[in-house]
Image (cartoon, rainbow, N blue to C red):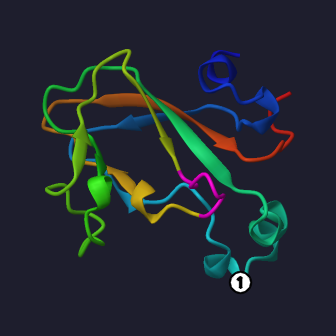
Amino acid sequence: HRTASLTRIPRTHQEYVQVLRYGTNEKYDAHHDYFDPSSYQSDQGTLNLIEHGKKNRFATVFWYLTDVNDGGHTIFPRAFGLPPVRSHSDCTEGLKVQPQKGKVIIFYSLNPSGDMDPLSLHGACPVGENNVKWAANKWIWNAPMGYVT
């Protein structure tokens, strides 16, 4: 209900919440949350799910559940129109968001036209020594998906 209130997008467009835990040195390389139909040509299940590109993940709501004193940033390496990245594991270029308990970030995977936004590339930088990062996310679709009612 809170995600629907915050985003003004109905609950019927949401996936269930996903809780994430990253320990020391754990990371998640940069990726997109949308499904690019050209990457799933041999995966009929995904193509059916996204109706060959008609439906897709529209936005992500991401909550930090803990403070992380060293590392663990969420990175947007293409923020501000930066050029394509050389490495999807590089955490030196782009916008970095430090994990702080209670902080929520929202970012969009699709442009207002409905096209996939390559600038939405994001990842999780390695968590520093003796730190644990807890976070949660919810993906919101551009159409009702039937996960949450």
Judge by depth and name the residue closer to the eye, 25 or 101.
Answer: 101
Q: Which residues are magenta?
A: 109-115
Query: Can the viewer see residue 106 in this picture?
Result: yes
Numbered disc 1: secondary structure = loop
Residue at (61% x, 51% y) in the render: 112
Name the residue at 80% across, 46% down: 143
| x 25%, y 72%: residue | 87
**Residue 88 % position (x, y):** 30, 67
Query: How many discs mark residues in the rendered view?
Result: 1
As for residue 7 lying within the magenta part, the answer is no
Tell whether 48 sits left or right of 68. right
Instruction: Identify the residue shown where x is 12% and y is 37%.
Output: 129
User: Looking at the picture, which amino acid does disc 1 mark?
Assistant: Gln
User: Residue 115's spot in the image, x, y percent?
Assistant: 61, 64
Query: From the viewer's perspective, is residue 82 above or below residue 9?
Result: below
Query: Which secondary structure class fits the magenta region best?
Result: loop
- View extreme (front): residue: 113
Image vertical order of residue 43 relative to residue 34, above or below: below
Residue annotated with mark 1: 41
